[in-house]
Amino acid sequence: MVCLKCGETLSAGLKFCTKCGLKIQPSGERLLKVSGILFIIFGVIGITRWRSNILGLISLGHAFNFRSILGTITIIITTIILNIIIGILGVRYSRNIEKAKLLKFFAIIAILFNGFWLVLGFIDSFRFDFMYFINFVNIILFVNIILSICFLIGAQKNLKIKGGK
Ligand SMILES: [Zn+2]
């Protein structure tokens, strides 16, 4: 990393330039922090609600055509775990450009993971009523994808700083 003001070569994780004192802010920091915190919040909300959500879906009597009850539980639990892991990593390493690649990796995993379930749900809903597609699980998956994209952009921004050495 190079100081934008004086050009001094700096090691990662510094808050100020050691030569001129310029405040160093990796450009993806804010995005990673905000999306990371939202990931944690959604994860925690998921934990407090997943049981009632599953019971709610069962009582509605739908969404268990293609996906079994076990499948839905798997989606919800793994989504919660992934959310919290990504959230913690994002907040912790938001200004650590050395970890930007790791954050990017997790963001891509999250996009693929949530996207996979969402596409399955979408295909599935065509066989029944399209309104079935709009349910709690799919909304969470969709929000997770949006968050993951923000997270990916943040990580990519931090990676670029490293590349500009
Ligand atoms: Zn400087």
Image: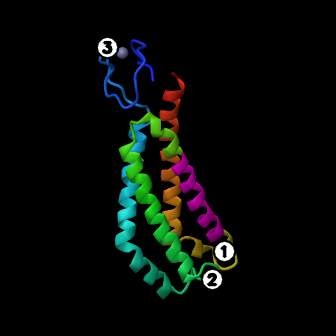
Q: Quadrant of residue 130?
A: bottom right
- Tell me if mark 3 has few (under 14), some (14-19) or many (20+) residues whose alpha carbon lies within 10 angstroms of its own: few
Residue 124 numbered tag? 1
Dot 2: element: loop
Q: Is residue 140 left or right of residue 46?
A: right
x and y, in percent, of residue 61 in the image: 53, 87
x and y, in percent, of residue 159 in the image: 51, 34
Residue 98 among magenta residues: no
Residue position marked by numbered label 3 in the rendering = 20
Looking at the picture, does residue 79 appear above or below residue 20? below
x and y, in percent, of residue 122 in the image: 64, 68
Q: Is mark 3 within 8 Å of ligand 1?
A: yes
Question: Looking at the image, which is closer to me, 14 or 50?
Answer: 14
Q: How is the image coloured?
A: rainbow
Residue 45 numbered tag? none
Dot 3: element: loop
Residue position marked by numbered label 2 in the rendering = 65
Which numbered disc, 3 or 1, marks the residue closer to the eye? Answer: 3
Q: Earlier in the sequence, mark 2 or mark 1?
A: 2
Residue at x 46%, y 40% (from the top left corner): 99
Q: Is mark 1 within 8 Å of ligand 1?
A: no
Looking at the picture, does residue 98 appear above or below residue 62? above
Q: Is disc 2 in contact with disc 1, using a CB cutoff of under 8 Å?
A: yes
Ligand 1, by image quadrant, is: top left
Kind of residue at disc 3: Cys
Kind of residue at disc 2: Asn
Q: Is disc 3 in contact with disc 2, using a CB cutoff of under 8 Å?
A: no
Looking at the picture, does residue 46 appear above or below residue 64? above
Q: Residue furthest top?
A: 6
Q: CA distance from mark 2 to mark 1?
A: 8 Å
Question: Looking at the image, which is closer to me, 139 or 17?
Answer: 17
Residue at x 62%, y 70% (from the top left corner): 121
